[in-house]
Image (cartoon, rainbow, N blue to C red):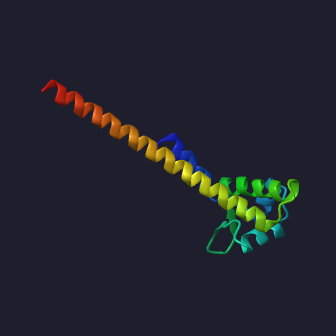
């Protein structure tokens, strides 16, 4: 596992209970529960049903707070913005993957042409 994969894994690790997450984000705990109820965030739940938030969850909550409090977007609109951002990130990852695949194929083609030229 490389450093980037370790960071991604570390950022997804549930570690903050709801009161700490709320304080970190400047959001009330009842708002976090509401966001969970409407599906904007899905914190990890322990066997005792305690909510745990990851670093990624904290970043998402801060983004939601900015959308709702600073920009005046309602929670339904914030949900649309978050979904669109996720889709854009997924598409960007797919573009990067396809670009790498094209580069690999071109490299293979170049090597193949070089071998044919030698024979």
- If the image is split into quadrants, where does the N terminus sit? top left
Q: Is residue 76 above or below residue 23?
A: below
User: Which percent across, then down, holds residue 20?
Assistant: 78, 58
- If the image is split into quadrants, where does the C terminus sit? top left
User: Which percent across, then down, holds residue 90?
Assistant: 56, 54
In the current view of this chain or complex, which residue is farthest to the top?
118
Along the line of sight, the residue nearer the viewer: 93 or 5 = 93
| Residue 30 visible, this orientation | yes
Q: Residue at x 19, y 29 (%)?
A: 115
Q: Residue at x 33, y 34 (%)?
A: 107
User: Which percent across, then down, holds residue 14?
Assistant: 64, 59
In this picture, residue 75 sits left or right of residue 116: right
Q: Residue at x 63, y 70 (%)?
A: 46
Q: Is residue 29 above or below residue 94?
A: below
In this picture, residue 43 sits left or right of residue 68: left
User: Which percent across, then down, holds residue 93?
Assistant: 53, 49
């Amino acid at each position: 596992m490389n450093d980037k994969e370790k960071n991604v894994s570390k950022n997804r690790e549930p570690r903050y209970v709801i009161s700490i997450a709320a304080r970190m984000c400047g959001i009330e705990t009842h708002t976090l529960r509401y966001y969970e109820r409407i599906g904007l965030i899905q914190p990890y739940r322990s066997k005792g049903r305690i909510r745990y938030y990851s670093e990624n969850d904290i970043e998402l909550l801060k983004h939601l707070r900015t959308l709702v409090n600073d920009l005046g977007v309602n929670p339904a609109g914030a949900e649309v913005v978050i979904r669109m951002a996720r889709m854009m990130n997924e598409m960007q990852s797919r573009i990067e993957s396809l670009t790498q695949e094209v580069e690999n194929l071109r490299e293979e083609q170049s090597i193949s042409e070089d071998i044919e030229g030698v024979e």
